[in-house]
Image (cartoon, rainbow, N blue to C red):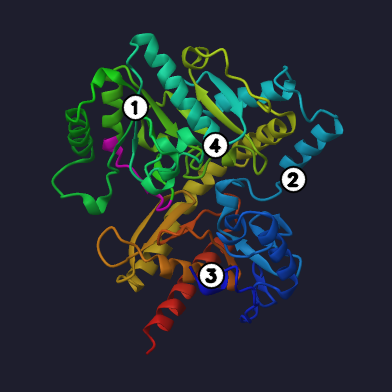
Amino acid sequence: MADNLNPARLTPVAVPRVETSHRRIVTPQPPPQAIPLLEELSRYEPTSMTWDQLPVVWDHAEGHSVFDAWGNRWIDFTSGIFVTNTGHAHPRVLAAMRAQLDGKLVHSYYFPTAVRAKLCRLLVEAAPAGIEKAFLLTTGSETTECALKLCRLRGQKISKTKLKMIAWTNSFHGKTMGAQTMAGRAGAKAWIGTLDPNIHHLPFPYPWDADGKLTGAERFERDMKALLASGIKAEDVAGFIMEPYQGWAALFYPKDYVEAVRRWADRHQALLCFDEVQSGFGRTGKMFAHEHFGVKADIICCGKGISSGVPLSAVLSRAEILDVDPSLNSTHSGNPLCAAAGAATLEVLKDERLAERAAGLAPKVRERLERIQKRFPEKVGHVFGHGLLWGLLLTGGKPGEWDVNLSDRVTEAAVNKGLLLIRTGVGSIKLGPPLTIAEDALMEGIDVIEEALAECLATAARP
């Protein structure tokens, strides 16, 4: 991590002034006026909340722009971690929330409301064929925990031992206990202690791990065979849960790999769940990213982009799966204010054809990023993505290792130039602007990434 992210170093650093139609940097970074607030946050909340990302103090945001209170403006390539797919503060979403507030209904437990009915209908209509119902929750972690429960409840109707859930290495499914147990990062779940013996992992089919002889389908069959050889019975597998892509790298599974998972699940009466919390609602050029694979989902976990910024998530599935559990309810299920924002978000996505817009911009983004890769082939090892989701992987010491220090420095340099990026902490540069972003702002932001990378490499090369 770059030095001035250290909480012990709250000294503003002078940076060059920036003034374009989409960016404005006119103060040191962080601004001197921000220091008292950053100190207060460091005192009263966990350090991770203040210092995991760069100290950009948001004052307001609109469209593809984030502003602080001291005259600075950033092009947003984060969408608040893929939440504001419709852009920050979309007028129609704000109007829907204002109308709900003016109607004096902001909480209803889970007594019926018209706005909840509308949202559930719109979600089912937006989903691929076969989805019949929606269960509303608050966070993405709740949806993946729910998927685990539904797979097992349905499995136990077939056999009392049909409890096993299969996920993938380096996956991410949330931060609650069940979600982190299903996730594939060992370090993130060390705190749990005794792990669920019915949750298992397959190796993610990274392209740099391939021997060049096996197709995606053959890799799945090989790895599944190895898992079963360890003592797991195929008939005990209740379900699979997979992200369409691994978020840290914007890296999708091979299409034939996912097709093979679907075939195996069908043969063995297992469910296939797609964790679309990050990938849904037009982000990849499809309403849901698993549509790129041409397979059906039994359960879809949704969040983030579902509501343009307020806490809302959903589990989408068939009636026979969702209706199996009479306890599917929650204090804030379909909260009226959140439901209003969610319904408006879905209408904006449809009316403005934002998934199609993301798909249309994708070739231009790919061309620009691959041009950067050609300019710096020794450091930009891979370019992955679809729609308006992209990742540049910065090469480390050997295949499968990535340069975390360089990605941190590039992220900081870009922020100092007026481009807001997420600090991934894993050696990647992640792009996820609002789907409404102006094309010239999108290209300007990519130019900033190239400029920041060039400067960081030039600095590292100096004696």
Indicate the quadrant where residue 104 lies.
top right
Q: Which residue is mark 1?
A: 198
99 lies left or right of 216: right
Q: Which residue is mark 4?
A: 140
Q: Amino acid at mark 3?
A: Glu
303 lies left or right of 257: right
Spatial CA span between label 4 and label 3: 28 Å
In the image, what residue occupies the spot 46% across and 22% down?
149
Q: Decide: is 366 above or below 234.
A: below
- Residue 296 is a magenta residue: no
- Secondary structure beneath label 4: helix
In the image, what residue occupies the spot 53% across and 36% down?
141
- Secondary structure beneath label 3: helix
Spatial CA span between label 1 and label 3: 42 Å
| Mark 1 burial class by Cα count in 10 Å: few <14, some 14-19, many 20+ | some
Q: Which residue is mark 3?
A: 412
Question: Which of 284/277 is in front?
Answer: 277
